[in-house]
Image: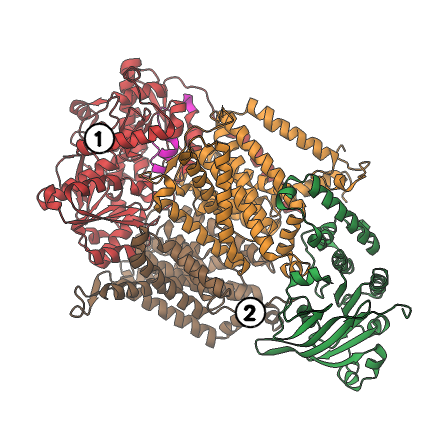
Chain colours: A orange, B red, C green, D brown
Amino acid sequence: MLYRENGQFKTSYSADQQIFPILQDRIAMGLLLAVAFVAVPLLGSEYMFRAIFIPFLILSLAALGLNILVGYCGQISLGTGAFMAVGAYAAYNFQVRIEGMPVLLSMLLGGVCATAVGVVFGIPSLRIKGLYLAVATLAAQFFVDWAFLRIKWFTNDSASGSVSVANVNVFGLAIETPVAKYLFCLSFLIVFGLLAKNLVRSHIGREWMAIRDMDVAAAVIGIRPVHAKLSAFAVSSFIVGVAGALWGFVYLGSWEPAAFSIDRSFQLLFMVIIGGLGSIMGSFFGAAFIVLLPILLDQLLPALGSLVGLDFDTAVVSHVVSMIFGALIVFFLIAEPHGLARLWAVAKEKLRLWPFPH
Amino acid sequence: MKLKSLALAAALSAVALSTVLTAPAAYAQAKEQFFPLLPYRTGPFAPNGVPWANGFADYLKLVNAQGGMNGVKIIFEECETGYLTDKGVECYERLKGKHGGATMFQPLSTGITFALTEKAPADKIPLITAGYGRSESQDGGVFKWNFPLMGTYWVAADALTQVIGKKEGGLDKLKGKKIALVYHDSPYGKEPIPLLQERSKMHGFELQLLPVTSPGVEQKSTWLQIRQSKPDYVLLWGWGVMNSTALKEAVATGYPREKMYGVWWSGAEPDVKDVGDGAKGYNAVTMQHGAEPNSKIVKDILALVHGKGQGTGPKEEVGSVLYMRGAISAMLGVEGVKRAQERFGKGKVMTGEQTRWGLENLALDQKKLDALGFAGVMRPVSTSCVDHVGANWARVHTWDGAKWSFTSDWLQADEQIIKPMVKAAADKYAAEKKLTRRTPEDCQS
Amino acid sequence: MTTKKIGEVILDVNNISLSFGGVRALSDISFNVREHEIRAIIGPNGAGKSSMLNCINGVYQPQQGSINFRGQTFSQMNSRQVAELGFARTFQSLALFKGMNVIDNLMSGRNLKMKTNLFQQALYLGAARREENEHRAFVEHIIDFLEIQAYRKTPVGRLPYGLQKRVDLGRALAMEPQVLLLDEPMAGMNVEEKQDMCRFVLDVNDEFGTTIVLIEHDMGVVMDISDRVVVLDYGKKIGDGTPDEVRSNADVIKAYLGTTH
Amino acid sequence: MGPFLETLIGGLMTGMLYSLVALGFVLIFKASGVFNFAQGAMVLFAALTMARFAQWIPQWTGLTDKLLVNLLAFGVAMVVMIGVAWLIERLVLGKLVNQEGITLLMATLGITYFLDGFGQTLFGSDIYKIDVGLPKDPIFLLEQTFQGGILVNQEDLAAAAIAAALVALLAAFFQYTSTGRALRAVADDHQAAQSIGIPLSRIWVIVWSVAGFVALVAGIIWGSKLGVQFSLSLVALKALPVVILGGLTSVPGAIIGGLIIGVGEKLSEVFIGPYFGGGIEIWFAYVLALLFLLVRPQGLFGEKIIDRV
């Protein structure tokens, strides 16, 4: 009953173009932020922060980046892990090689490097489409994996090829405690989420979607595919790269290329599919879903098993998890190609019209 | 539409449930010491991960069956890592708080070890990385919480060079020889390189590095290169499916297995059993473990654990190489706790901090080992504040087509070579992390 | 309509030939278009009408021939360039951006005219916001003109065919074109829809004085609204002139009017 | 010279095996427009089934004759793969008709995860043995011409032979059987195929079964080389550059592409690799394919795509 938009008339185009045109949504968003910034830090347990919230936030950021490329511009990429890696290792190098380099800056610079690499590997997208491009991006994945294993310079000549960063602190505040890390990642996510939203609702966003939906028509109305695709690759890789830097600096603290393997690329792709292609919200839903599901099943299945008297060993559990993943991917593609975000929208639609069916 | 709302419901409930479930039960049981397990029973390396985990679990069960650690029973819980670093970190976070707090962690993965090395000090939980992990972490002065007990990959590599030296009739005879290192292209595989380079400088043998991309099922070109460069020996730093593949390729290119030496991850039954006779003559180093089907400890486990139908894995596996590895690793953890109890009170549950002291002051002499049933299996281990490795002895065993049997006597890695390397590496790490070495006072804590 | 003043020749198509692999799609086509006129291209299926338009706005690259627009001569057009010259076009098989709503589809027509850079857009302050609003205002005029106010926020994929055709036209108009290329704007429409569409085309033509080149099947419509007609058959030009001339052209009658469509 | 020839031959052999996996991709793509990422998972699944039944059948029935056991196991595996094909059509493809390629690709990613998990839950994740009696020992040619001779791996030789035979078989199947022709018809145009009364769903089941068969053979060969284990599903990643290079729709493309990649990768690793510290073959294959694409976006034998408006 409370969720109604009638009586809210837009008197200006800016008002009509807001991110959340409906008052109730704005209120809800405000509450959500309040919870995220105040309630969660007060209530969350350390495990929640370290094992759920922080990875969730960072991966949402990465998914957000990927969604711009896949969801908005329609250029599929199986090399996301590689771009995360570039972000992480580049940031690491800025950190260790330049004395007194502020962490925040090295992370952003990491993102910039990822952008460069992203654009380079995006160039094939001008010639090749769809499936072919998917394979082309795998080239990025494997090459980058190899480069960080082989080229000692990138890892500051560490014997084993894995690197670790000193205590992260930003503007003098140490990002040490789980809560601090959580808030750090959260602010990153919100800022980038906002910027991304602005991009996709401005003309650059329309260029991307035009290319995605009907590239010939897009060209005819004067959109340059080169510009659209490469800008999508650039923006996407930048965000993904920053996410990679966060993953290394804040979540792992010490890492090797395997942390950004092809599995990561697939994981992120799944987040985007399940969450909702072409939806900022969707990226968050997807990340939450994919981060939580295995953890949940890990703990749920043995419990269920013991109820019916068989005990799953950990191997079976993780196999079942991958089965469920697979099944869900297919399920979503069939039942709801636009993912959780769409379900969310549908639910809201219903609520708005409630109690009337239409 | 029905499907959709269903999915929505599923998604939401999943979120809701998880928030409830994943909060660890942080209540302490009376008299129960919690041992978390981070095995990998899945993925490309499962064949090696499984027996290790079973041995580990069985030993803990044995301890309980024998009345626990001075009356303190052990509870343990597994969390599958699949050898994925982020999964490992999640497991660590999940388990560290449970059942009154984790006693110690044994990550069983170089990647996870690296990640946890950053976290353990803050949580005051020691890390045991028996025979693996980062080699420089044996420097207790910098790595207060890491315990690469009974040797690191550097120890393993050093022992192997010595064996080869012996075979040639003296290390000096290695001059002008060529040794190829076929290694898993990852931090794990790269660990031995600095030491081998050091050795090759000393003795003037040529070291050929041949990385194999994980998981290592594609090695044709590697072995073609070996066939062309004809090294006198091949060191195999492989793993899981990579080992059997390497041996098969060796057969296919006709490289003599007698001249192949593997690290201990490449020297267990799963690595050779499906190559069978093809692997006959292949050697691997063992760090105080190995196939010991007749040792007392194995008999005990068969009697008190499998006998009661509580065996974790199949009976046949008990006493196999990696099974023993797991059992020994578990034993070291248990002994660490017992040692701690000697100082902080027998029959009490030890905190991670106390256990750390126990591990740092391990004194497993032959008598103790015999009592534990490890007579003949391993040599004494004794650690100190600066030395977190405790022992650097190794043996080589050889596959005769059906089973592994020891073909060398005990060798000790050369401290003169390893010590300075450890110190240098540890200092570099300390510098990177802006750490200062521990003071003698700190050692007393 | 007779009152409308037809201007100079602005678009001159000379000896265009196009082929895919071996297949000749167009051979040696020439015709011109005067300012403000409505120029129709007719012909049976596969006559090469759409290919002709595709050559003009750079979707296909003709092997021979040149196109002259307002004194500039091009042997090959590139879509971007053509758009900047002031060409807009609608598509036979709908080519709307299905994932976007009506407003965004029309706004995308304004893309060429939007100048703020990526960073301004990311911040969405000042310039970027102002720009959005100005162009939004213009788009709203078109929405009113095409009488689709009710569907502003509807994803075009969900609109009925007739309306989609209108949005397609709207997107072209949003570009404020000098020359409007319409590829079968009335194909597959019922009578009312056709009448509406005719009205829009004529209004565009005399309100905004836009020059229009249109492909159409429906002879009735063509003969009513167009000033001059080009007839293609199997990639060749077989007739050119006012509707009446064309009607009386023997080849045309044989090739086209005779046959049923 | 000797080493070069050796590497070349080795490369060709490996290439043959790549083609075998690539063939699976091409078949399915031709007939159902699906870029089947799950081909690797199918290889693993088929091989697991085969390996385990070869192990179980003697235990259950007491059969000892190795050939017979292998044949039985093969039969079982084949049936299973047909079942898988049917289920995939039923539960996945049937419900995704006329979706874009990307969607279908993602669907097969889902199938991949499912099959990997399912296979290992059923059959375990240890290393299993497939022994169809392929010879293991190397033979040496031209020992008088080259010192040390040229090494040829008999197993690879046999494998390559089988692969070649299989390709011939499939070619014949497509040429001369009515089903084969029907498949080609579908490949060329779905509507047309339907209009002349070829039921798509059945065709798809058949194609996926054929792909399953190819996967099984590939699985057996790789399996007997490497042992049957999770990593087997990764051979799909080796086959991707092959299909891309060869063109998604061309069977000969798959073969030639396979050979090119196989040779290119081995030569690069052996002769260029050392200068880069080795381990380059995995990405070299991809970069090779990529560079090639830039010149010829539709691949070696793929059909050219024209945008119609």
**Quarter the C terminus of chain B occupies:** top left
Q: Indicate yes or no whether the magenta region holds residue B15.
A: no
- Residue D58 at least partly seen: no
Category of crowding for the residue at label 2, using alpha-carbon neighbours closer than 10 angstroms: few (below 14), some (14–19), many (at least 20): many
Label 1 to label 2: alpha-carbon separation: 70 Å
Q: Amino acid at mark 1?
A: Lys
Span of residues in magenta: B98-117
- Please state the horizontal and vertical placement of residue C218, each as a whole percent of the image: 80, 72
Quadrant of the rendered structure where residue D290 is? bottom left
Q: Nearer the viewer, residue B199 or D78?
A: B199
Of B441 and C174, the residue lying toward us: C174
Q: Mark 2 — on which chain does it sit?
A: D
Q: Residues within 10 Å of mark 1 (few under 14, many from 20)?
A: some
Residue B345 horizontal side relative to residue B170, left or right? right
Q: Quadrant of residue B45?
A: top left
Identify which residue is drawn at 78% across, 50% down.
C138
Q: Is residue C51 left or right of residue C139?
A: left
- As displayed, is residue D35 above or below residue B127? below
